[in-house]
Image (spheres, rainbow, N blue to C red):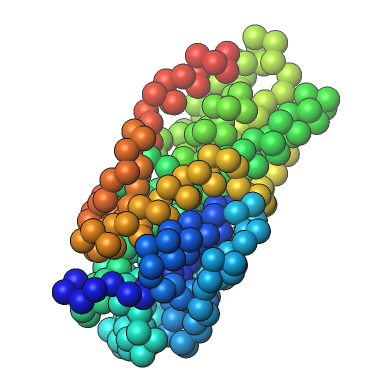
Amino acid sequence: MQRKLKKIGVLTSGGDAPGMNACIRAIVRCAIYYGLDVTGIRRGYSGLINNEFQKFTKRSVANIIQRGGTILETSRCNEMFTVGGRKKAIDALKSEGIQACIVIGGDGSFHAADLMDEESDLEFIGVPATIDNDIWGTDYAIGFNTAVNTALDAIDRIRDTASAFERIFFVEVMGRKSGFIALEVGLAGGAEEIIIPEKKTEMEDLCRNLQESFKRGKRSSIIVVAEGNTVEDTINIAKYVEMRLKVECRVCTLGHIQRGGSPTAIDRILASKLGIAAVEGLMNGKAGHAVGEIKGEIVYTPFKSTWENKKGIDEQYLRFLPMLSS
Ligand code: F6P
């Protein structure tokens, strides 16, 4: 950027994630610390297109670090994937005098930001926030840790009733097309099986493993199923197992419970670090990138890489599970 940076915007986009507020707070306070003006853009890209702006002061972000959701609200805006939609967004930013914009969200939101970065003289930087944790360029996205802990709490409770009734429970967790939540929750919750999109699961293998565990004396089981698994709908998996093994099965879909609630300390700290890194990145020529943290270090990954690459799961987890669930 040739001009001196004076005014930045910030918006949250896509699925909300616990810690987004902590990130907004860090961005606003850090920007003001460096003498910048900060404007909040309401309702993600939809709000941007409709000129929904709010001026932020240090006090506007008081008392939000502990709150889930996003005070800016969010949206999924397909119009941003049209040239016309992006032109409206760019014009709105310019008319508000915003020179650079921080986008807190996932890879789809970064994709739109990258296109605007190319199509205008404005600057954009991304902060990864999604409970799915499926963003290339960071070990963890904001919100993932809280979602895992929320789901884990539910699984611990389900285990009590599963063992009281000697049932098999299929617990469906979120994660869109990825199994990060399912893997962490499965390992931490002592699940007998995990069904995720990244690993092929055969129904017959699943039944055989369960049967063997009954022979070893197990009377109840928890099977964590990622919503994006490629085997079957969770209800159908449970029906099949019930019919094949003649055991009582129940399904519990955790759903949006996993997206809400107060962020964990880990998410608040990550959100604060990445928020500051985004402001400092804009001041230091890192526009066109998403910030992230890899092995404890702040990194800046070109936007393009964040959606062109697919983040892989930690294969070790798959090796650990059969050892631990025996
Ligand atoms: O991307 C976050 C996420 O919660 C996914 O895990 C889930 O598949 C999706 O959003 C649900 O989206 P919506 O709230 O729009 O139904």
Observer able to see residue 195: no
The quadrant of the rendering that contains the N terminus is bottom left
Residue lying furthest right in this view? 164
Classify residue 3 by image quadrant: bottom left
Task: Please tell me which residue is depicted at 27% across the width and 62% down the height of the picture.
Answer: 283
Q: Quadrant of the C terminus?
A: top right
Q: Position of residue 102 (x, y in %)?
A: 38, 66
> Would you identify the image quadrant in which residue 112 lies?
bottom left
Q: Residue 164 lies in what quarter of the image?
A: top right
Residue 176: x %, y % from top left:
48, 53
Q: Camera-side residue: 209 or 74?
A: 74
Residue in view at x 36 percent, y 75 percent: 7
Residue reaching furthest top?
Answer: 216
Residue drawn where x is 67% and y is 26% of the image: 221
Name above or below for residue 3 compared with residue 175.
below
User: Residue 161's spot in the image, x, y percent?
Assistant: 80, 31
Residue found at the far left of this picture:
2
* Residue at (52% x, 60% y) in the render: 25
Q: As rendered, which of 236 and 59 lies closer to the eye?
A: 59
In this view, 92 is above or below 213: below
Indicate left or right for 40 with 265 as reference. left
* Left or right of residue 16: residue 102: left
Frontmost residue, 20 versus 257: 20
| Residue 33 in the image, given as x and y percentages of width and height | 42, 61
Residue 22 left/right relative to 108: right
